[in-house]
Image (cartoon, rainbow, N blue to C red):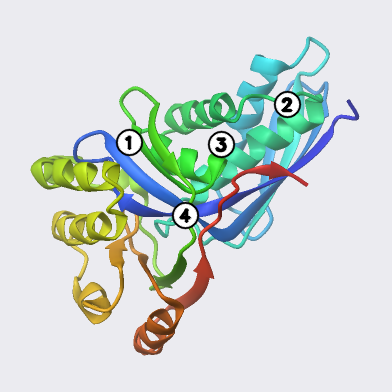
Amino acid sequence: MDGHGRATAPAAGTVLNALANGRGCAFAIDLETTAEVTLDDSGTFRGEVAEAADADTRLIERCAELAVERWGDDETTGAQVTTESEVPMAAGLKSSSAAANATVVATCDALGVDPDPTDACRVGVQAARDTGVTVTGAFDDASASMLGGVTVTDNTQDELLAREEVDWDVLVWWPDQQAFSADADVDRCKRIAPMADLVAELALDGRYGEAMTVNGFAFCGALGFPTDPMLEALPDVDGVSLSGTGPSYVAVGDRDTLESLADTWNERDGETWLTTTRPNGCQTT
């Protein structure tokens, strides 16, 4: 153990938002967050977000603290954590889950331990709950980021129901605004639980494109986001949805179709990324 660790974790897109019925489904995408952790005996855990000096750092600090409590020793009582990310914050692209996963795994790397990935994922989820950055615990988002591929979960039990490696092209449109998951209107989301039940059935049947499209229309209605970006993608894409609690949208399909859709979405204010899914999740670097 040299007391220093580094790890990267991918962002993720939504198939099923877990706010309605506690079950969620997400897939890893090739946008990364990196965490570097240096352990010490200071008695404090300090965080820094490289691209946002005034960002709330409680999540990454708590992740390092919980990881040290779980896998560390009495000599390690503090750490400096720094994250750097390609993923915009509060955009629905699971920036918090990616930061949490990268921090937990980087802390373990600094401690010289190699934890079970699902256990490490649950530590980050607990940190997210402890610091109030998520309503559901976001085990769906966190598991997709930690494990790669697409995952289906029961967030009420932090249980992995299914995982599959997928090879999709992905288009993301981010309208350059923020929507924090903790601020989402949960009561409105729970009203669409019957639709979420249908989406869960589709996802567990491997019909991810259909699932995410139904999810997108349902949650756009519940959370007050426009469906126009989805309608611009249909019927040519395999699936399209509001990602998380917004404001980003994600579409999957063949690359030519997504390149054409990118031309349309580029006429909107904001940014687009044409990327791919990630079969592998969080890893040390």
Q: Which residue does the numbered mark 3 point to in the structure image?
A: 58
Asked which quadrant contains residue 211, the reply is: bottom left
From the viewer's perspective, is the residue at label 1 or at label 2 nearer? Answer: 2
Question: Is disc 4 surrounded by few (<14), some (14 to 19) or many (20+) residues within 10 Å?
Answer: some
What x and y, as percent, mark residue 225? 21, 65
Mark sitting earlier along the chain (2/3): 3
Residue at horizontal 67 percent and vertical 40 percent from the top: 47
Mark sitting earlier along the chain (4/3): 3
Q: Which residue does the numbered mark 2 point to in the structure image?
A: 114
Q: Which residue does the numbered mark 1 point to in the structure image?
A: 135
Residue 92: assigned label:
none
- Give the CA separation, mark 1 to mark 4: 27 Å
Q: Which amino acid, mark 3?
A: Arg
Front-most of residues 255 and 118: 255
Work out whether residue 249 can be spotted. Answer: yes
The kind of secondary structure element at disc 3 is helix
Q: Which amino acid, mark 2?
A: Asp
Residue 166: assigned label:
4
Q: Which amino acid, mark 1?
A: Val
What x and y, as percent, mark residue 91? 42, 60
Work out whether residue 138 can be spotted. Answer: no
